[in-house]
Amino acid sequence: MVNYIWVGMMVIGFVVAAINGNMDKVNEAIFTSAKEAVTLSFAMISILVFWLGIMKIAEKGGLLEVLAYLFRPIVKWLFPDIPKDHPAQGYILSNMAANLLGLGNAATPMGIKAMEQLKILNGGKNEASRSMITLLAINTSSITLIPTTIIAIRMSYNSQSPTDIVAPTLLATAVATVGAILIDRYYYYRSLQKGGK
Amino acid sequence: MNFVQSFSIWFIPLLIGFILIYGTYKKVPTYETFVEGGKEGFSIAINIIPFLVGMLVAISVFRASGALDYVMLAMRPIFSLFHIPAEVVPLGLMRTISGTGALGMTSDLIATHGPDSFIGRLASTIQGSTDTTFYVLTVYFGAVGIKKMKYALKVGLLADLIGFLASIAAISLLFYS
């Protein structure tokens, strides 16, 4: 899908430019924006290096485990299908904790491990189980404490206060997560009523 | 307004301070660990370059040609009915499909409208508030061979919509009320 959108934006752009007669602007846009993308990536190095450095300390100190411990009651409520002390629970907890700290690289493998366990719990079928969809819902609306990349972009465009979007982002992401959980429950109970588990 | 800004300003130093003291308490070699983790940050920033170049060029061709203006012209009357700024609608759609594509759109919006404008702040919040549904779906279900995804896509997309609307509400309430 991304492939079509990407090609579409460019080709439509060229056609519209031909009709409007502003091909010179398009030419300029190609080269300035390519340069801008590289400048932007370099501007992000500073904050990404710093943040991932700090987060590595949190990871090595075992903060993920502490967070996982705190989340345990929530996970029990969210995933009633998972038996007590099943390995899937541990992976889900680590996945949530890593997402919260913005450690996308650590969250994805944990999420996949959790999915593997959930598939075993579901008898190895190639059908999504209730818990799988819940895990997915939590991940697509993932709560992240600090949106580092965006702060870096805002900094590189000389924002007066690059971090002032932290509070609204937290608010929006919390609403999205609660919404995701509620929608997930709604569709689960509806699928029960329809008869298929 | 004041509280929002002080919360946002205090939050990061407090979190960093907490992590540093916690790490020291847990006898983590803090500085060496910091350097080790920092290297990952460097490679992430470098790896993102080709994605950003590809997306930003496509977006700016689309905008410079005037095509984006036509799209906005067509969308504005519909979305202004719901108090949704048409400028961020393409970003909202892209957010569900491609993370780097959305990142490109966010930086384009911030560059065009300014980071501290309504649109700039809104784009920042939308980018941070949800994750890429199609990507998460493909990676997680693909990795373990799930073919029948049942109602998973509906849940993910509706959650994205909620995140999008919540971002508009949060920015309007916290900064412009």
Image (spheres, rainbow, N blue to C red):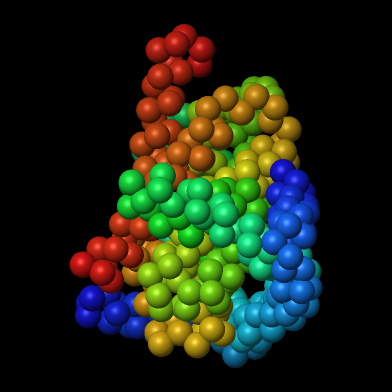
Point 45% across, 84% down: residue: A159
Residue B60 image point, x, y percent: 67, 67
- Which residue occupies the foreground of this view, B175 or B73? B73
- Which residue occupies the foreground of this view, A146 or B28? A146
User: Is residue A119 something that shows in the picture?
Assistant: yes
Point 41% across, 44% down: residue: B78
Q: Quadrant of the N terminus of chain A?
A: top right
User: Is residue A89 something that shows in the picture?
Assistant: no
Seen in the picture, residue B171 relative to B146 is either above or below; the reply is below
- Which residue occupies the foreground of this view, A81 or A104? A104
Point 50% across, 48% down: residue: B74
- Which residue occupies the foreground of this view, A74 or B118? B118
Q: Farthest residue toward the top?
A: A195
Left or right position of A47 against B9: right
Seen in the picture, residue A152 relative to B157 is either above or below; the reply is below
Residue A4 image point, x, y percent: 75, 46
Q: Based on the displayed image, in which of its 4 quarters is residue A29 positioned?
A: bottom right
Point 29% across, 63% down: residue: B172
Q: How many marks?
A: 0
Left or right position of B153 against B46: left
Left or right position of A75 against B44: left
Residue B100 image point, x, y percent: 66, 61
Seen in the picture, residue B77 relative to A26 is either above or below; the reply is above
Residue B112 image point, x, y percent: 54, 74
